[in-house]
């Protein structure tokens, strides 16, 4: 019996709904848990695999003139605006035409993906895993029959890994290797340090420079690796990964670190010229890319001045300082 002749079931309809929900830019942990519970039913899991296969097969339509026209229209349309920040979201869409365009974009990616400053992107991998790329991120996907390997050159990515015990999922940076079977975690490579945050499941983390046994992380733990130095600490994973919801959450974060984090999403950065306030801890939640809100809050709470510059920059400085 062909796929066309097979009668659709309620599970097929639900699977289509999950493809749409999981393709949105922001997904809560509650939604991920709900999906995992739904997919525990073998009939649901089979329906979801069928839906994924239909999505993946859209790549075979790359030569179709209608699809090429839709793709060109999407390119010309440019970034879509969400609140005060612009994103180019390449997740699955709710309409069939949009889903086909996304499929073409994926299959033409040839395994290398990147985002610009202020951009986020979602990619759906052929095994059902998903990767969210944060601002200014570069990575490569290299799949073989025996393993699934991601090379994160710089930036930050959030991984939702499809389980496959016989085909490990490995994320590598210049100094770290992270191995997962089926789990949700974040890897961040900015400057000399690699940070891994585990949301659910389990991952093994090993520094490349040390001949040591891999370190097994539990949910709500993070490890920071800088060369041979490895630090394991507890963390609120929802707070640490709030960027996936378009938010930056600061909990007793030194002002200098908060400014550096906000600047990662800005084409024109904030200049912090207030040494006495640099180490002052701040708390708050801000939309990523919303420079005006962050500057206004910092200036008000810490008694600083926001001085605009001729090149579009803004400088946070102490009152009376030129």
Image (tube, helix red, strand yellow):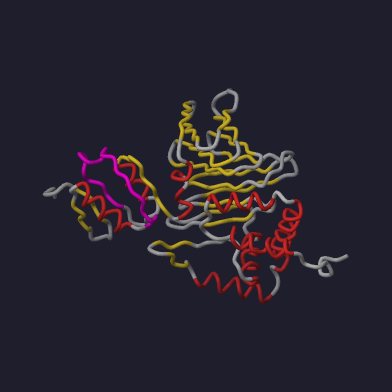
The span shown in magenta is 270-289
Pick whichever, 287 or 171, lies toward us.
Answer: 287
Residue 238 placement (x, y as % from top left): 47, 45
The N terminus appears in which quarter of the rendering?
Answer: bottom right
Q: Is residue 72 left or right of residue 289?
A: right
Residue 135 placement (x, y as % from top left): 46, 53
Pick whichever, 253 or 189, lies toward us.
Answer: 253
Residue 272 covered by magenta stretch: yes
> Which residue shows up at 38% across the image and 56% down it?
287
> Which residue shows up at 65% across the image and 64% down it?
104
Position of 213 relative to 220 (above/below)? above
Q: In this view, does 294 lie to the left or right of 53?
A: left
> Which residue shows up at 39% across the image and 50% down it?
248
Residue 69 placement (x, y as % from top left): 62, 75
Q: Is residue 322 left or right of residue 248?
A: left
> Which residue shows up at 56% across the image and 56% down it?
122
Q: Residue furthest left?
A: 320
Residue 312 placement (x, y as % from top left): 28, 60
Number of numbered discs: 0
Residue 5 covered by magenta stretch: no
């Amino acid at each position: 019996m062909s796929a066309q002749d097979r009668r659709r079931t309620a599970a097929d309809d639900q699977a289509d709904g999950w493809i749409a929900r999981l393709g949105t830019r922001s997904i809560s942990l509650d939604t991920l848990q709900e999906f995992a519970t739904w997919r525990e039913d073998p009939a649901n899991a089979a329906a979801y695999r069928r839906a994924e296969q239909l999505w993946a097969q859209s790549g075979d339509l790359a030569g179709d003139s209608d699809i090429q026209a839709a793709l060109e229209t999407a390119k010309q349309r440019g970034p879509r605006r969400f609140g005060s920040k612009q994103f180019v979201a390449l997740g699955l869409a709710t309409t069939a035409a949009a889903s086909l365009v996304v499929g073409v974009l994926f299959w033409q990616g040839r395994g290398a993906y990147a985002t610009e400053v202020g951009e986020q992107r979602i990619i759906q991998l052929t095994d059902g895993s998903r990767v969210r790329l944060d601002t200014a991120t570069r990575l490569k996907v290299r799949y073989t029959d025996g393993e699934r390997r991601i090379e994160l050159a710089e930036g930050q990515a959030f991984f939702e890994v499809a389980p496959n015990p016989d085909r490990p999922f490995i994320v590598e940076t210049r100094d770290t290797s992270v191995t997962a079977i089926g789990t949700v975690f974040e890897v961040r490579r900015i400057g000399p340090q690699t940070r891994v945050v585990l949301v659910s499941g389990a991952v093994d983390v090993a520094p490349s420079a040390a001949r040591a046994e891999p370190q097994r992380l539990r949910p709500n733990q993070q490890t920071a690796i800088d060369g041979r130095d490895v630090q394991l600490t507890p963390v609120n994973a929802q707070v640490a990964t709030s960027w996936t919801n378009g938010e930056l959450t600061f909990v007793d974060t030194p002002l200098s670190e908060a400014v550096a984090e906000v600047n990662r999403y800005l084409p024109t950065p904030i200049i912090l010229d207030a040494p006495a306030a640099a180490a002052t801890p701040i708390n708050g939640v801000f939309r990523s890319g919303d420079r005006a809100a962050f500057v206004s809050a910092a200036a008000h709470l810490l008694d600083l001045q926001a001085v605009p510059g001729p090149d579009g920059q803004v400088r946070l400085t102490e009152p009376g300082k030129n």
